[in-house]
Structure formats: C-alpha cells, structure tokens
Image (tube, coloured by chain):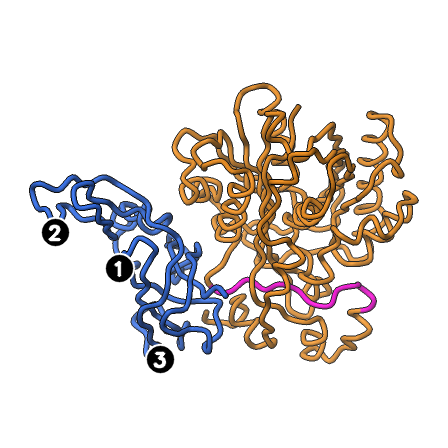
C-alpha cells in the first residue's frame, strides 16, 4: 500500500476580482467573469513567491501527517515560477522544514502538472522502498501579461502532499496512476521571458481536453473502472469552465467536482491547481470513497490518479479546511496588485 | 543585516528559517538568537540548541513610515517585539494583518517570507515575519 499520508495548502491573503482587472482595460468584467467561471484570484504579496508558499503548505502537510521534517527522504517542488532559474527551490524548502541534509531534492517543471509529476516520483520511490516518506509540492505565483486573457486567472497558491507506505498512516491510497504526454505547443514561456505565451483557443480541444481524456481513459482501462465508480473528481482547473466540460464529457455529475473546484475563488494556481483541489476533497471525503484526479500541464501532458480514502483520514484532516482558509482574504485594487506583483517599472 | 555578505546570511539560516535558538539546561532559560554562554549561569551554564515556538503575542509595536535602505517600498509597515511561548522576545515585521488587529497582547504566528529581494540577480534572503491570528 502507498498513498497520501498528509496534505497542506497555502493561499495568499490578497485577492483581485476579475471585474477590477477588466475595469482597467475597459472590458466587460461581469461578462468575462461569467464566461470563464472565475470571480477573483489570489495574489501573492511582494514578499511571497513559489518557495514561501511551498514552505507554508509543506509545514501544514507535516502537521496533518504527524511526522517531523527529518523523516522525509525526498522533496520535489513543481512550479513554473521557481524564484531562481538555477538554484533549487526544493533545497530551500528542505532546509526551512528541517528535512535536510539526508534528502533527495529536485525542482520540476511541466507547466501546470509539475506538482502531480512529483507525486508520481514520490510514489515510485516509496513503493520501491528507497524512501519512507516523500513530499511533492505544486506551487506557483503565476505570471499573466497585463491585458492578456490569462491575467484574469493567473493566481497564486501551493498544494503539498506527503506520500508514504505504512498501512496505518495512509489516509488516501493511490491505487494507480497513468500519464498521457505529447508535444503540443499550446502555452510556453521562453528562457528569460517574463510572461508566458499561449495559443488562444488552441489551448482547449487539442491540449487540455485531449490530454486529460487520454490520461483518464488510459487509467480507467488499466484499472477496469468507469468514471461513475468515483465519488469525487478533480481536474486541472485553468478556469471554472473547462473542468465542468471535461466532467460532463465523462458523464460525471457536476456535484462530484464542486468540492475540488477552487479556481473560481482563487484563480488558476497552475502547478498548485489540481493538488489544492484534491486537498479540498480530502477535507471532507469519507473512508472508502474514491477520488479521480487528472492534472494537465501545457506542452502537454496529463497525470491521472485513482485514489481511495482510508479510515485513517478521520484523525488526520487539516486543521483548517481549504474552503474555510480561502475565506480569509483582503481585496487589492489593480494598482496594489501591480505593486505586489512587481508589474510597475522600477520595482 | 540582510544585505550583508552571503556567508553571514547562510550562517543565520537556522535562526531565520526555523527560529533555532538555544536553551540553558542549568537555569532552564531559552535564548534567541543563540548565546555563546548563558548570561545567568556563566561557566556553569549548559547550552543546547533548541527551536523556539512559532507562536506568541505582541509586547510592543510600531508603524514604520521612513524605512532603511532596501525597505523603502514596503512602507508603511509594522514592526513588533513579540514574546514567544517560551518567554523569548524577538523583533519581527508583522504582515498580512489589519492595522486595527495589531495591538499589545495580540496573538501572532510565524510565517516564512522573503525578507530582502532587491537585487534581481542576487540571492534572495528568506526569513521570518509574523501575522496576527484571531
């Protein structure tokens, strides 16, 4: 048996509404907000980055797992906004949570699915007996070019999962995982470029939908299950609309994805997105319930997971559930947002 | 201090990242930052490394309007003397907290934040700040 033994989420305090961003660019905010299914997004403060969000999420994960940092054998931090181009975020996180120095650590990048790639690596290391516990983090302070469609959704947040293999500790067993990857240029950011580029509508059908469909179908065929065998489903959520559409295509009822659909309240947290969604489901899921998770990373690929909640979850839930945590917020106007995200020249 | 040499910063990581202080096993007193000798017991003191708790309360606070070099864009910001649960007092910035909640006696918890990141090609200094918790 191997699976999740602890989980934690960190979301910055500040929010900016889609309507406020639209006001600056003289667009119809209400219409855009309804169209993308996102009301507001979380904004990292000037003194926050993918690393600080990771550390806070990791600390919460250690708290729910009830293990000290020293027990971690590996840390993988997935992000597309690592603070350094060269120097691992994972090493900083490892030191901050006192997991160093006997530690395997690396940074991962696969657009929005680098966090779940870390989960897969940890799962392999735990199952092979190479480590006792592994920490996988999906974290981002996503960049959106001013007046670009992505600016309405590019949010900040981190989700952390600790993977272990002890039967009396696993709160959600990961039965299997399956990945689907192709070379698809739907979204990218070149070396030294400040903002990513995307291919507009091309990011939908041949990218998000094709890859998640491929991963989920592959997984279900492998484990001989159908979409309706799951009590909850969490899909990558670049906006509030895509996850609902993909759920519908599998015949999954909308009520099964609502608990894990966090993007409408905090925006797309990129590598954190599907991980935070899964953490929110773990906040309420009952023993025996099954969760289908499929991340998506542009470029492009999807990792699908079949997860079953165990009885251990009852005494290992997060102190503050995700949906409760994100209620603590403070609104920023566009000027304040531009200051915190260093979009003003000279900062 | 945060703009000083890299080796100096690096030596302070345990202090800045996870509040590692020390503790005298003789007089049962905690210290932060670490002391080289126990000021109470002198040569009889027995100091061991120990992390301080991440929670405490505000003893005194101030609002900074004119900041030192490197912090100019952060004003106005709050500084507080915080008494941690082991009675150790430390000075820290208070962030993510509404002004009306920052007062003497308010409960606070430690956060991991960037302290200084003014050189786009330089090393980032991470460390502790605190926020008021209800």
- The secondary element bearing badge 1 is classed as loop
**Looking at the picture, how far across and down is residue A49, in whole percent?**
51, 56
Tell me what residue is drawn at x 62 percent, y 44 percent. A317
Tell me what residue is drawn at x 36 percent, y 77 percent. B63
User: Which residue appears farthest toward the left when viewing the image?
Assistant: B43
Q: In terms of depth relative to the viewer, which is nearer, B24 or B125?
A: B24
**Residue B6 located left or right of residue B119:** left
> Does the stretch in magenta take in A157?
no
- Marks 1 and 3 sit apart, C-alpha to C-alpha, by 19 Å
**Looking at the picture, how far across and down is residue A176, in whole percent?**
74, 28
**Residue A137 located left or right of residue A285:** left
Mark earlier in primary sequence (3, 2): 2
Mark 1 lies on residue: B1
Crowd class of label 1 (few under 14; some 14 to 19; many from 20; radius 10 Å): few
Residue A278, numbered circle = none
The chain displayed blue equals B
**Looking at the picture, how far across and down is residue A42, in whole percent?**
62, 63
The chain displayed orange equals A
- Marks 3 and 2 sit apart, C-alpha to C-alpha, by 35 Å
Mark earlier in primary sequence (1, 2): 1
Mark nearest the camera among 3 and 2 is: 2
Crowd class of label 3 (few under 14; some 14 to 19; many from 20; radius 10 Å): few
**Residue B119 located left or right of residue B47:** right
- Marks 1 and 2 sit apart, C-alpha to C-alpha, by 24 Å
Range of residues picked out in magenta? A34-46
Mark 3 lies on residue: B65
């Amino acid at each position: 048996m191997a699976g999740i033994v602890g989980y934690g989420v960190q979301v910055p305090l500040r929010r900016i509404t889609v309507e406020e961003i639209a006001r600056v660019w003289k667009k119809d905010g209400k219409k855009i907000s309804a169209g993308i299914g996102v009301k507001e997004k979380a904004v990292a403060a000037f003194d926050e980055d993918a690393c600080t969000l990771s550390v806070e999420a990791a600390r919460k994960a250690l708290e729910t797992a009830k293990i000290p940092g020293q027990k971690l054998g590996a840390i993988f931090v997935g992000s597309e906004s690592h603070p350094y181009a060269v120097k691992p975020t994972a090493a900083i996180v490892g030191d901050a949570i006192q997991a160093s120095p006997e530690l395997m650590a690396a940074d991962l990048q696969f657009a929005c699915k680098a966090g779940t790639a870390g989960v897969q690596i940890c799962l392999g290391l735990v199952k092979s007996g190479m480590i006792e516990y592994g920490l996988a983090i999906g974290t981002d302070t996503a960049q959106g070019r001013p007046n670009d469609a992505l600016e309405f959704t590019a949010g900040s947040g981190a989700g952390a999962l600790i993977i272990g293999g002890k039967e009396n500790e696993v709160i959600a067993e990961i039965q299997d995982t399956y990945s689907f990857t192709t070379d698809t240029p739907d979204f990218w950011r070149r070396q030294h470029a400040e903002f990513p580029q995307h291919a507009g509508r091309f990011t939908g059908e041949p990218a998000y939908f094709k890859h998640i469909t491929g991963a989920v179908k592959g997984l279900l065929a492998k484990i001989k299950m159908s979409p309706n065998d799951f009590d909850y489903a969490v899909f990558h959520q670049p906006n509030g609309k895509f996850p609902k559409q993909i759920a519908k295509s599998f015949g999954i009822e909308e009520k099964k994805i609502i608990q894990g659909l966090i993007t409408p309240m905090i925006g797309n947290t990129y590598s954190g997105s599907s991980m935070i969604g899964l953490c929110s489901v773990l906040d309420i899921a009952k023993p025996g319930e099954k969760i289908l998770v499929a991340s998506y990373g542009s470029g492009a690929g999807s990792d699908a997971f079949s997860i079953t909640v165990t009885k251990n979850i009852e005494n290992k839930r997060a102190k503050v559930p995700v949906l409760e945590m994100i209620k603590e917020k403070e609104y920023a106007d566009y000027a304040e947002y531009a200051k915190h995200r260093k979009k003003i020249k000279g900062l | 201090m945060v703009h000083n040499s890299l080796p100096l910063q690096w030596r302070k990581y345990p202090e800045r990242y996870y509040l590692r202080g020390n503790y005298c096993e003789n007089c049962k007193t905690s210290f932060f930052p670490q002391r080289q000798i126990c000021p109470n017991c002198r040569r009889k003191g027995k100091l061991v490394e120990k992390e301080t708790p991440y929670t405490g309360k505000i003893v005194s606070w101030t609002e900074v309007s004119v900041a030192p070099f490197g912090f100019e864009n952060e004003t106005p910001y709050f500084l507080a003397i915080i008494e941690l649960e082991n009675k150790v007092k430390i000075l820290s910035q208070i962030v993510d907290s509404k002004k009306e909640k920052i007062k003497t006696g308010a409960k606070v918890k430690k956060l991991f934040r960037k302290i200084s990141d003014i050189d786009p090609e330089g090393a980032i200094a991470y460390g502790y700040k605190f926020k008021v918790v209800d």
